[in-house]
Amino acid sequence: MTAVDPGDPGADAPAISTVEDLLARAYAMEIEATERYAEFAAQLELHSNVDVADLFRKLAGAERKHAEALARDLAERGVAVAPGAALAAPGAEGLETTLGDALHYLMTPYHALQIALRNELRAFAFFSNLSHSAAPDDIRRLASEFAQEEKLHVELVRELLARLPKPEEDWAYDPDEPRMPD
Amino acid sequence: MNAPVTTLPSAKDFKSDTKPVWCPGCGDHGVLTSLARALADLTCRREEVAIVSGIGCSSRMPAYTNCYGFHGVHGRALAVATGLKVSRPDLTVIATGGDGDGYSIGGNHFLHACRRNVDLTYIVMDNHVYGMTKGQSSPTTEPDWDNALTPGGTGLRPFQPLVIALASGANFVGRAFSGDVIGTAHIIAEAVKSPGFSFVEILSPCITFRPEQRDWKELARPSPVPVTNDAARAARRIMTDDGFNIGILYAGNRKPYQPEIGRAQRSLQDLAREFAL
């Protein structure tokens, strides 16, 4: 269901035929990422994994800022955006989100950043592909700008990852695990 | 005079402030999001919706939604939901639960709810395991699922909920995958709109006790055939697929059962007379 190629928006995703379409798509991607990271933060917080919850909350905040900037840009062009607009077409995971099954209650900030890196790479691939497509020049130019921004995010996440120690092999070991079938 | 301003609730409005205690990564998080989105897409009002459940992880749904809710007893969600719908036909009634609650403890209610065809929607979050009680085999567990409680597996043929729903008279049968939030919201919305008993089976991985179910996202795919109103054809398709075809698999046209209860007005005296000794 989610076996989507990096940068593939899904067969049923709305077409991008104007710059406004592209801005609306980018806005929807950021909103979707904001909501998903916030959900992840809430899930981890409830299981007392404070470090990862904080990190997901910061990621949600960063995505929200991007969404707000895009909303301002759209407003200047007279385009109204629906709050909570969704990007993902049925059957396709969002371009800047990851399915919840990537979470684990004992996960570390390193794992959280790996999720963020995957998301940023997919967003970069999407905009980069669009910038090299046969789309009109103004769309390709803007897509190229967005691709550069996503590239910066990729580099930033990679820098953060490099500062963190890799988790131990038994990071998921829980001496009081929930699974007690015996 | 200006008309009163009315704002329809958004998907967020259908989520309560209570944060789910489900494990991080549980598929039920996605189902909650889909359900809230479906209700918003249907332009429902919170006071017009009631969510009824039994017992189990997924049966906690009423606590996490912001509308009427009833967290009932094990396996009895459909009995409560049926009673509610026939007495309050104006409400949108949705029963939710898991495979253990719905197919084992509540199995007989499931058959007869399909048969009665009352206009309500039943959402089952199926993870092929009893999660809340720490990982026992459920009616839909694969016969060879090896674990400490059932070494070598149960050896039992899994329950086939969609075919049984069809054979029992459900008017709408669909299968969804929790990781496909928007697609699941669409199927739920269509199920609610469909008259009669609508059954939606949602593959919702339990990553704690069945971590291998992470692979479901690679297996689930849209059904290659369009929806049919031919129950026999739908049954053949469902019995021969591998359990991962997603979509609306059957939409019939049976008339919903709606007795006069709830519409007829009876006086308190009439009711008291029936109980008089």
Image (cartoon, rainbow, N blue to C red):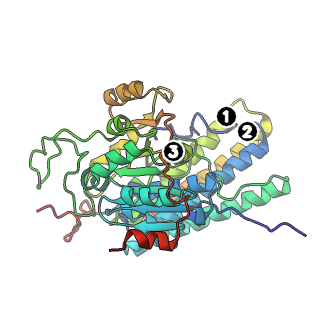
**First in sequence: mark 2 vs mark 1:** 1
Name which residue type carries label 1. His
Cα separation, mark 2 vs mark 1, equals 7 Å
Nearest the eye: B274 or B114? B274
What element does badge 2 sit on?
helix
Chain ID at mark 2:
A
What is the x, y in percent for residue A107? 35, 64
Nearest the eye: B43 or B183? B43
Name which residue type carries label 2. Arg
Q: Is residue B88 above or below residue B178?
A: below
Cα separation, mark 1 vs mark 3, equals 42 Å
Chain ID at mark 3:
B
> Label for residue A140?
2
Residue A71 left/right relative to B267: right
Chain ID at mark 1:
A
Cα separation, mark 2 vs mark 3, equals 41 Å
Q: Is residue B159 visible?
A: yes
Please tell me in which quadrant of the rendered image residue A167 appears.
bottom left
Residue holding disc 3: B191
Question: How many numbered marks are there?
Answer: 3
The mark lying in front, picked from 2 and 3, is 3
Nearest the eye: A14 or A103? A14
Nearest the eye: A49 or A144? A49
What is the x, y in percent for residue B136? 19, 56
Q: Is residue A159 visible?
A: no
Residue contact at pointers 2 and 1, CB within 8 angstroms: yes
Name which residue type carries label 3. Ala
Please tell me in which quadrant of the rendered image residue A161 appears.
bottom left
What element does badge 1 sit on?
loop
